[in-house]
Amino acid sequence: MSFDYLLLTRALLPEIALVIGALAVLGYDLTLGRKLPNKDRLGAALGLGSIATIAALVDAVLVGRMGPVYGATLMLDSLAVATRIGVLALTLLTLGIAAGARTPRHPAEYVAIILFATAGFTLMAAANHLLVAFAALELASLSLYILAGYDKARVESAEAALKYFLYGAMAAAFLLFGFSLIYGLTGELELGAIAIRLAHTGMSPLLGIALVMVLVAFGFKAAAAPFHLWAPDAYEGAPTPSAALIASASKLAGFALFLRLLWPGLGAVAGGAPGAAIGWLTPVAIIVGASILLGNLAALAQGNVRRLLAYSAIAHAGAMLLGVMAAGVTGPGPLFYYAATYGVAAAGAFGVIAVIEVNGGCQRITDLAGLARRSPLLAGCLAVFVLSLAGIPPLAGFFGKFVVFAGALQVGGLMDPAGWLALLAIAMSAVAFYYYLVVLKQALVLPPAAGATRIRVPLTAGLALTLAAAALVVLGALPTLVLRYFG
Amino acid sequence: MNLLPLTIHLSFAGAFLALVAGSRSAAAARWIALLSALAGWGVTLWAAVHFDPGAGYASLLNLPWIESLGIRFHLAADGISLTLVVLTGLAAVAGILFSWNVQEDTGAFFALYLALIGGVYGVFLSADAFLFFVFYEIAIVPKYFLIARWGSTNREYGAMKLALYSFAGSGMVLAGLLWVYGAAGGTGFGFGELALAATRLTHHEQLIIFALLFVGFAILAGLFPFHTWAPTGHVAAPTAASMLLAGVVMKLGAYGCLRVAMPLVPAGLTYFQPAIAWLAVIGIVYAGLVALVQEDFKFVIGYSSVSHMGFVLLGLAAGTPQAAAGAVLQMFSHGVIAGLLFAVVGRMVYERTHTRRLDELRRLPLHRLMPFTAVVFVVAGLASMGMPGFSGFPAELSILIGTWPVSKLWTLGAALGVLVAAAFTLRVIQVVFFSRTDDAVTVADHPLPPLTWPERIGAGLLLAATVVVGLNPALLLNWIIPGLTSPGLQAIWTGGTP
């Protein structure tokens, strides 16, 4: 074990850049920006925030794969580095979206909290220690609660934040309880050491309780059924850029952490092998099935486009958990590819909504009517995002589904629940295709409502959305760009 | 031959250019679309002239793509693919000529149209199951928007139904392919590799996989009872899309059955042969009878397509090379004839009379108002009935002769379908064009816009194709039969036993 602070500082350079950036945003706003109108304060904050995020992105690339750091408290392997880069890119996209959305009341604080949340995400990506993982998760979650309720004058936003907070706090309690049981059983906090202990002791009833606690907590955080109830309200009420962040970067970081916890940490009690005691794979399989079914079927009935995206997010969370199940065979590559590209598409869809919102509301699906006439650029981007969510080639969403399902079928064919869940997910994607087409029908086929005006797309938001759409096309056509990193 | 991949590039490049140019000038979009379709057709004809039937399933392009999963960008063609890409080129050109008058969002219309064509070319040329599937799905989305945006009767319903059926079918295909791929340990997606992997599965698993793949593809080919999307979708579609959907896209399903489902799991065909063949025969007769009682001119053609595609499925299910050769020939023949019939109904008649109801059309002396159209429809109708001298005759005859040794009942059932086809075709010819033979109504009472040159050229191209192939079917059969008996498809005819 080595406790080299210099190495630790090096490993944490992206987080340091983000925190310094957040402080700089607040400092500028407090001094020079005080007299400026809100719009300019937002611009300055976003500018500084973007610089900080890009600096963190460069750091993350330069730091690269360092392996275990600081006595394996952090693990900078392929998954961690890729997740850091993915999370930072999604934060940049969110900042671009915020530039085109309604100006919040205290713009500098808003951007600073986004940066704090991002620091939590990047730390989650690398955490290899129960306490660090918990602290990182809570840093991210607390920031997200505030972001969800930022538009506090609106009742919906306050409701979204309160629901999100109450569920999230409950989940945190479950998680801490589960972690403390694991610590009590193994006497270890570092995941590698826990794995060594568990390989000897195996499954025990108390460990079973701990696993259930942890799964319940992550089920809440990831909005997987049956722990999803907060998600539709939060997606509906939260300010749109906040919803984009909750739907994208937070998902990616959460699943990366979950994957690291389950396979490298608790892989010994997965329970998939024939003859082994039931482990965490069985409850995860149930959550996957429930999420895919409930998410897709409930989305059919939605008239509100944000709630529709929330239920589709639940369905996608099911597919991502399937990727977690299969990761024991396939490695983290497929799950990362799925979660990252899903994040781009989901954040992009919220970005389009955010820009429309500035030009009159965008809650109902019918509010999208005639988007192709009102703004061809937005309509084109929305088509790419939604078709990617639906999993249509050559977009990235298709290949994400493909690798995850192929991996799930490789686990044990149909001798293994993962194989059946993959077939279920494929069947339900035909259901999903319907509600995605309903959205696109409004946007691309139907004429605009009377009185709907042309939409002026702000330059930054337009650029961010175009780049996101281009990324989905390029990554979909050349998935090796991402997969190669996982060997 | 090696130029064939260009057809895909030309179509997608044309789609992009048409979209860009369309925002400024509709005429530019039209010409870009026509030129890229013509260029694509030219490439297929050039390849046909230089085609060597003995070359087997010849690689055209084979690049590594996603190496960690064993996926390659592999294009190849044999006589079967060649027949179908020539058809695609012809149908694409004819469709553009018949949609020369599209006014709304012309650029987007032709962009989607060419994207669909590009996907179709890609399917016919893919030699890697993953690539095949990607092109197969690329072809789904433009269909929806072409119908929902530019269609007519009940278009949103028809478009959604068609898209969902197609997508559900492709989901079954994906499930089947992934299952085989997973069983192989994820080594490769080449057709040969997958077929080898499938032999390692148990008999039961093979049967389920065959059912997934075959039914998934056959939904798109209009297999009874999964055919109901076809009439509603094709009736709702704008003319060019109807021509392409009925003429070419339904062939994607049949081609998938022949190229993927049957060689991958030859044992499946042996097991499911009676079920598939009976469904095909039921489809032929049932859809024909439904066509007989339709009161909408376009629905008659829509159901006749399902009936004719039943012959293709029967030819495939019979499991003899002769019947399968007839099936491929029927794909070509129906592609041309369905295109022609939809063009007459949707463009020549409907856009001038503004009605497709038979009881309204019967009051017009259409044979005098539009004599050229009447001639085209009568000739196309004869071809559709399977008259000697047109491409439908050798195709259906091959299928019937090839099926006879397998089952006399199926052959008789399908032959009954030929009679029904004659009945419904003659009925619409009589009702639409020759109901008013008295002189009480004159041409001057119903001033209809004259036929345009693009329509005449398009109709001429399609008529020429059906007559040329009808008089000299060996032209195509000399390509098709070596393809069917090549090593890759050999397993189908032996039931999997070498």
Image (spheres, coloured by chain):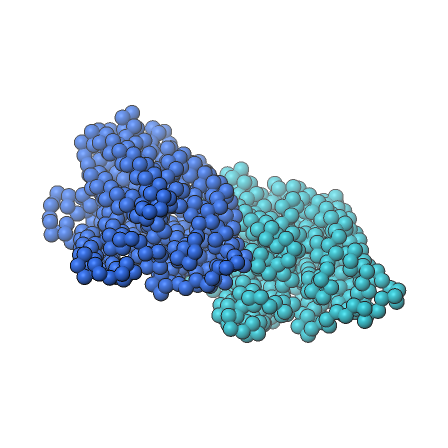
Chain colours: A blue, B cyan
Residue A213, how many percent across, how many down?
Answer: 30, 31
Q: Up-down: is A65 above or below B468?
A: above
Closer-to-camera residue (B124/A458) = A458
For the point 56% across and 68% down, which residue is it?
Answer: B106
Residue located at (32% from left, 31% from top): A212
> Residue B427 appears at what percent x and percent y?
80, 55
Q: Is residue B184 above or below residue A482?
A: above
Q: Residue at x 52, y 50 (%)?
A: A438
> Relative to A90, is B104 on the left or the right?
right
Above or below — where is A337 with respect to A378?
above
User: Which of A402/A249 is in front?
Assistant: A249
Q: Quadrant of residue A228?
A: top left
Residue situated furthest top in the rendering: A205
- Note whether B471 is above or below A358 in the view shown: below
Residue B55 in view (yes/no):
no
Residue A132 rendering spot, x and y as whole percentages = 20, 42
Q: Position of residue B347 (x, y in %)?
A: 68, 65
User: Residue visible at 73% across and 48% down?
Assistant: B290
> In what quadrant of the picture does the N terminus of chain A appear?
top left
Foreground residue, B23 or A364?
Answer: A364
Specify whether residue A239 is in view: yes
Please give left or right for residue B370 compared with residue A205 in the image: right
